[in-house]
Amino acid sequence: MNPSAPSILVIDDEPAVRRLLRITLEAAGYAVTEAETGKQGLTLAATKPSEVIILDLGLPDLKGVEVVRQLREWTNVPVLVVTVLTAETEKVAALDAGADDYLTKPFGAAELTARLRALRRRTRPEEETAQLLIGDLTVDFAARQVWRGNVEVKLTVREYDIFRLLVLNRGKVLTHRQILRELWGPSEVEHTHYLRLHMTHLRQKLEADPQHPRYLKTEWGIGFRFVE
């Protein structure tokens, strides 16, 4: 095993799934550690730190959401949850608890490794900068300005705050509740219509084709994601 290979902890109770993930991840250059229960996964996460944790929500001992909550008490390691198609409520709960992204079973190797690369990029220290250039968008954090090409885009205070939050968490799914709690406060987490209206306006102002957005993606029934 390459000692410099990025480490992945897989927490899943199905041996066949763990075997498939190990084969896929090792072929992609990762070093894999396996756990078959939530408790075992928590122990390994504490004693053998990994760069990313892949967590199945359907574990035999602890609910996946509880595993995420316990992890977030002491670590910010990225957590990629995997679920079956019908587990949307659990998926949202895991993201609200602090998971970083999700995949719905079945998924392909290319999609899995792409999500892992995105999560690992988010954890690498970046040089602090007052400006960020992504595609044809420029964000000036110091001046609270956004440019599309050479044209400044006039955003309201709330639109800018939503856009800034998504950009700073680019590549990560943010649930409706996470965004509303962060920007509106805990008492407003159910008012998703506010958020959807602002997102519509943001797309109209920032996207070349608001009906098929390049940057501001909707995760249906869950939230939003900014894609570089």
Image: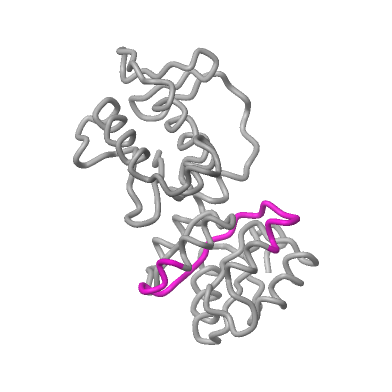
Question: How is the rendered protein coloured?
Answer: one colour
At horizontal 64% and vertical 58% (from top left) the residue drawn is: 6
Against 194, residue 148 (above or below) is above
Residue 226 in the image, given as x and y percentages of width and height: 41, 40
Residue 65 in the image, given as x and y percentages of width and height: 58, 67
Q: In this view, does 200 lie to the left or right of 160?
A: left
Depth check: give the residue in front, 128 or 70: 70
Q: Is residue 81 magenta?
A: yes
**Residues rendered magenta in the picture:** 70-89
The answer to which image quadrant residue 41 occupies is: bottom right
Depth check: give the residue in front, 107 or 144: 144
Residue 188 in the image, given as x and y percentages of width and height: 47, 42
Against 212, residue 98 (above or below) is below
At horizontal 40% and vertical 50% (from top left) the residue drawn is: 223
Q: Is residue 119 left or right of residue 220?
A: right
Q: Identify the residue at the far front of this view.
A: 187
Quarter holding the N terminus is bottom right
Q: In this view, does 91 lie to the left or right of 86?
A: right
Against 101, residue 143 (above or below) is above
Quarter holding the C terminus is top left
At horizontal 53% and vertical 55% (from top left) the residue drawn is: 96
Q: How many marks?
A: 0
Depth check: give the residue in front, 60 or 112: 60
Q: Does the magenta stretch include residue 195?
A: no
Q: Identify the residue at the far right of this view.
A: 47
Against 136, residue 180 (above or below) is below
At horizontal 52% and vertical 57% (from top left) the residue drawn is: 95
